[in-house]
Image: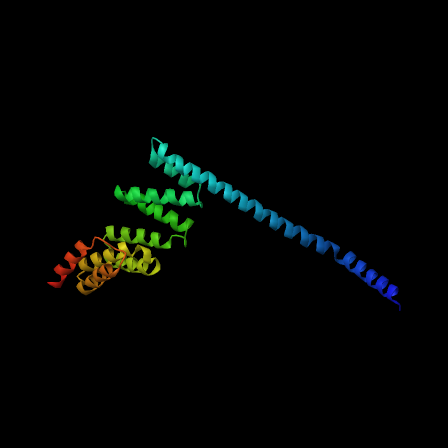
Amino acid sequence: MDLSDKLLSFHDKLARFFEKYLRIILATIVILLVIALSWIGFTYYKSKKEKTASLKLMEVVKSPNVIQALQEVKDKYRGTQAGLQASLLLLDYYYNQKNYQEVQKLINELEKEYPRKIRGVILYGKAKIFEIQGDLSKALELYKEVSKEQSELNFLTYLDIARIAEKMGKIDLAKEYYQKYLKKSDIKNSGYVEYKLSQLEKK
């Protein structure tokens, strides 16, 4: 068989192969195309939604009712960075207003919407609720967990752990965390902590 015959034979086999598997090949191409287009569409939609949400959040300061405006951004733009920021601002507001029922509600919502993204903040909020409810053991446990998972919050958690430990009569633990607080080079205004340590040393 010369070269031209070999080429014709190969061409026939190739043609039969494509004829046999054409539907599968086309279906695969269509599926891949749909996936690609869906991803492009989703990315564009998400980017557009993020941009719109950010603009809405910036408009909040102009609103005569800032809290209501934040609530609207939170509810309408769930899953966006702006929606998260609105939720955190509301969380801070309700906590300062001592509206702990709304704080609890927001923490539950945040846990469902952003389970891993802000886990430390969620745990910290839960610890505060347990402390307010008088469950100091659970609050202490959660503050310690936050300290391990989100060390950037240690300027808060070290003091929380020390304070709770002191309330529970765990003086050595309280001293340990006040000392940890003082050792953090990025923490200033340590006069209060030094005073607390001097008081605990007398016990």
Apparent side of residue 37 relative to residue 93 in the rendered image (left or right): right
Please say if 54 is above or below 126.
above
Q: Residue at x 67, y 50 (%)?
A: 30
The N terminus is located in which quarter? bottom right
Please say if 41 is above or below 169.
above
Apparent side of residue 6 relative to residue 141 in the rendered image (left or right): right
Give the quadrant of residue 53. Answer: top left
Residue 22: x, y in percent?
A: 75, 55
Instruction: Count the labels in the image.
Output: 0
The C terminus is located in which quarter? bottom left
Q: Which residue is drawn at 18% across and 56% down?
A: 193
Residue 7: x, y in percent?
A: 84, 63
Residue 171: x, y in percent?
A: 17, 63
Residue furthest out toward the top: 64
Give the quadrant of residue 69. Answer: top left
Apparent side of residue 159 relative to residue 19 in the rendered image (left or right): left
Apparent side of residue 180 relative to residue 56 in the rendered image (left or right): left
Residue 170: x, y in percent?
A: 19, 63
Residue 76 in sight here: no
Q: Which residue is drawn at 37% across and 35% down?
A: 60
Q: Which residue is drawn at 32% across and 58% down?
A: 151
